């Protein structure tokens, strides 16, 4: 007698798939650090203030030459504004006449006619750089300031050289081989006079504005470099 084989029904297995879980913020990929495109507000404010402060050069002396001698213990001073000379101009001209030097007058400096406009452009350039707020704009303004200073110092040196070397051969006092070029910056002895050439109020403001601009540019450059390094690490 044969026994029939009965096949058991196949068992089915149900696999439950868990729904996707949201990724928590702790496991989310870190956001890529961005490099700063604009300067910080405080940097832009500092640049604007430094630029506007240079307006002082329009009504304060920019440079000065001081002279001391035994017969002038109180000293003599020649102050140079953006458009004129002031101070003991008449007394200095009287002394210079005896050694054959030319009379100091505004006509010696045709630059006086355009200096106010040059200063205005420098001020406007700084304000525009602050409004743009980009490092390249600040760098361009600083470059313009430095170019202006170099030109002004060269112009002053050129005038001083001609003024101190082109002497009247018929002067009452002649010292063989002696020239009377005033110092460009610092101290110099001229016969029995001690001469000092230094910035005045306007000059110190100009150099202060340049210093602020350079420091802000360095700070913003370092800030950009740090942000760039952080972006690479991430």
Image (cartoon, rainbow, N blue to C red):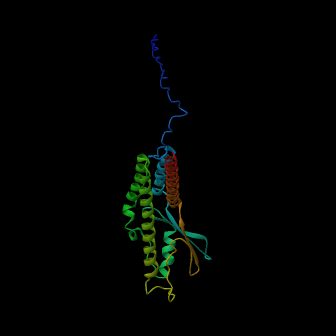
Residue under the point 53% across and 34% down: 27
Work out which residue is located at the far top of the displayed protein and give it. 1
Relative to 174, residue 59 above or below: above
Whole-percent x and y of residue 187? 57, 73
Say which of 97 and 140 sits in front. 140
Query: Whole-percent x and y of residue 145?
Result: 44, 60
Residue at the (45%, 62%) spot, across then down: 146
Can you see residue 125? yes
- How many dots with numbers? 0
> Would you place residue 28 above or below residue 137 in this image?
above
Q: Residue at x 52, y 74 (%)?
A: 183
Q: Position of residue 212 (x, y in %)?
A: 52, 54
Q: Can residue 46 be seen?
A: no
Q: Is residue 234 above or below residue 176?
A: above
In front: 150, or 132? 132
Q: Among all residues in the image, which is located at the extreme bottom?
A: 176
State the image quarter where residue 118 is shown: bottom left
Q: Nearer the viewer, residue 164 or 146?
A: 146
| In-front residue for pair 194/150 | 150
Q: Does 216 appear above or below 81? A: above
Q: Position of residue 193 (x, y in %)?
A: 58, 77
- Give the residue at x 45% y 17%: 10
């Amino acid at each position: 007698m044969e026994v029939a084989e009965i096949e058991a029904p196949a068992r089915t297995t149900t696999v439950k798939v868990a729904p996707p879980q949201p990724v928590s913020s702790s496991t989310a990929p870190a956001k890529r650090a961005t490099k700063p495109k604009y300067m910080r507000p405080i940097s832009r404010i500092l640049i604007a203030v430094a630029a506007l402060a240079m307006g002082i050069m329009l009504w304060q002396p920019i440079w000065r030459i001081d002279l001391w001698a035994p017969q002038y213990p109180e000293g003599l001073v020649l102050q140079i504004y953006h458009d004129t000379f002031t101070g003991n101009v008449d007394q200095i001209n009287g002394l210079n006449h005896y050694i054959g030097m030319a009379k100091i007058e505004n006509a010696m400096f045709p630059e006086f006619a355009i200096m106010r406009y040059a200063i205005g452009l420098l001020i406007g350039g700084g304000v525009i750089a602050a409004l743009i707020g980009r490092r390249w704009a600040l760098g361009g303004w600083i470059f313009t300031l430095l170019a202006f200073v170099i030109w002004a110092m060269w112009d002053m040196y050129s005038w001083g050289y001609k003024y101190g070397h082109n002497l009247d051969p018929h002067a009452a006092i002649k010292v063989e081989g002696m020239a009377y070029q005033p110092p460009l910056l610092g101290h110099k002895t001229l016969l029995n006079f001690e001469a000092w050439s230094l910035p005045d109020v306007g000059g110190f403001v100009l150099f202060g504005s340049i210093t602020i601009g350079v420091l802000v540019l360095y700070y913003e450059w370092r800030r950009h470099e740090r942000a760039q390094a952080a972006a690479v690490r991430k």
